[in-house]
Amino acid sequence: MERGVFLYSAPVQLASTIRGQSYRFASVKEVLAKANPPKSGDDLAGISARDAVERVAARAVLANLTLRELRENPVVPYEQDELTRLVEDELDDQAYRAVAHLTVGQFREWLLDIDTTGPTLRAVSPGLTPEMAAAASKLMSNFDLMTVGAKCQVVVRANNTLGLPGRLSSRCQPNHPTDDVQGILASAREGLSYGCGDAVIGINPATDTAESTAEILKVIDDLLKRNECPTQHCVLSHVTVQMRALELGCPMDLMFQSVAGTEAANKAFGISAALLQEGYELINAKGTAKGPNRMYFETGQGSALSSAAHHGADQVTIEARAYGLARRYKPFLVNTVVGFIGPEYLEDGPQISRAALEDHFMGKLLGLPMGCDACFTYHAKMTQDELESLKVLLGAAGCTYLMSLPVGDDIMLNYQSTSYHDIPTLRRLLGKRPTPEFDAWLDAKGIWRGDGPGPKFGDVEAVR
């Protein structure tokens, strides 16, 4: 197969027999969709398996497809989608050839093998397409996803070093419903006093303007410089707004954008690969972080379906494709906002938890510094206990970072997430530490000493 030229020939085997009944599938895309664990979004799209037996039949077919066949049958054709073209044209052929012959079932076994180490996975990662990562996830239990996710090591640097073994970082999210900078500042100080924010101080703005973005960034930049705090700042406005703010001369460590897994879905976000490239080049030229990693992306299962831009593919596979786009820009942060889109796509606690582990696994396998906003909207069927359990699962799976906000309740976005108190609790429970630079800063401030709280823990006066 020449680069960029697909045969689109159907694999030899797209049928299986279960309990004497034959199941036939029309395409690799259908196999991927029907092999997926139950998801309300796939039900909404009308592409999920009819019952558990058909799901097993699809998985039996999927297990025998080779990675080469997956590459030759992307869920959105090369001619129709720029993400497919970017992934294919930039794939590392040497890394790909090392695993191309494996079936998806063999690939799963290889990923789980004790002799397949983190460095090995990192070396193979540039040769994997998103469809390969998604296919493997569909044959895995939650334990499997955690085991491989914990082995994947992705280390990145901006003003500090993220993703080292034994570390659990957090985004401090001091949102305010009216973008009052003093309210944002007070919440950021509180978060830092609990040891949160080593991944980023990241604010979702209520007003998406360059002037508001610049004002918030200047206030947070002054806070960090005044306290000599080794972390990054970001305002999560649209990438075009951030580009205008950067041209105004404001400090900006990271540039943010939400991304999806198809060209059409990204068009609904008002972005394209060319626009992301423009932002990437601008933040590298004018951004204030040391780097070299200066981009921040957020994703979430169901985003393409919500804009009718999923091309009939399942939401897990489309989510993996978003990671295929993100890795092109060497990001410092990527996270799945797993329960934020709503129960139409992930209905309850088990579905949200499963999606979080899938996303973390797929992102890490594709070479991203993967975090997660473990969260749910108030009309989803998820309890606080289930959310706390998910945070422990993600921490044990080697998740790079989680969110942190006052009492876990975002008063601006109206959803439930991770609290400032949860992060130090998880670190103590799992024996994790923040980034090395931030860890030293917490010790110097008296906020955290060794493996436990210091004398200034939770004291906002420790952060001037």
Image (cartoon, rainbow, N blue to C red):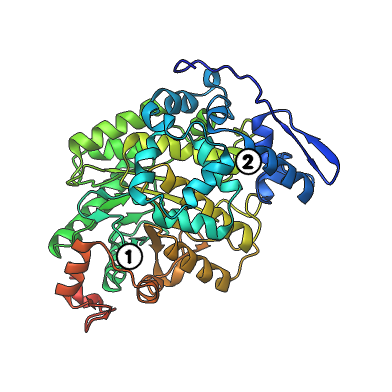
- Asked if the residues shown at circle 1 and circle 2 are in contact, with their CB atoms under 8 angstroms apart, the answer is no
How far apart marks 1 and 2 lie (CA) works out to 52 Å
Give the residue drawn at x 25%, y 61%.
Answer: 435
Quarter-wise, where is residue 169 in the image?
Answer: bottom left
- Work out whether residue 65 or residue 442 is closer to the camera in this orientation and state it: 65
Q: How many marks are shown on the rendered structure?
A: 2
Q: Is residue 256 left or right of residue 22?
A: left
Mark 1 or mark 2: name the one nearer the start of the chain. Answer: 2
Say if residue 75 shows up in the picture: yes
Considering the numbered disc 2 on the image, is that residue within a helix, a strand or a loop?
Answer: helix
Type of amino acid under label 2: Ala
Considering the numbered disc 1 on the image, is that residue within a helix, a strand or a loop?
Answer: helix
> In x, y percent, where is residue 434?
28, 65
Viewer-nearest of labels 1 and 2? 2
Residue picked out by circle 1: 183
> In x, y percent, where is residue 153?
34, 51
Give above or below for 446 relative to 249.
below
Type of amino acid under label 1: Gly
Give the residue drawn at x 68%, y 50%.
Answer: 40
Count neighbours of disc 1 (C-alpha within 10 A) and say few if under 14, some if 14 to 19, many if 20 or more.
Answer: some
Residue picked out by circle 2: 63
> In x, y percent, where is residue 34?
70, 41
Give the residue drawn at x 36%, y 32%.
Answer: 276
Say if residue 300 shows up in the picture: no
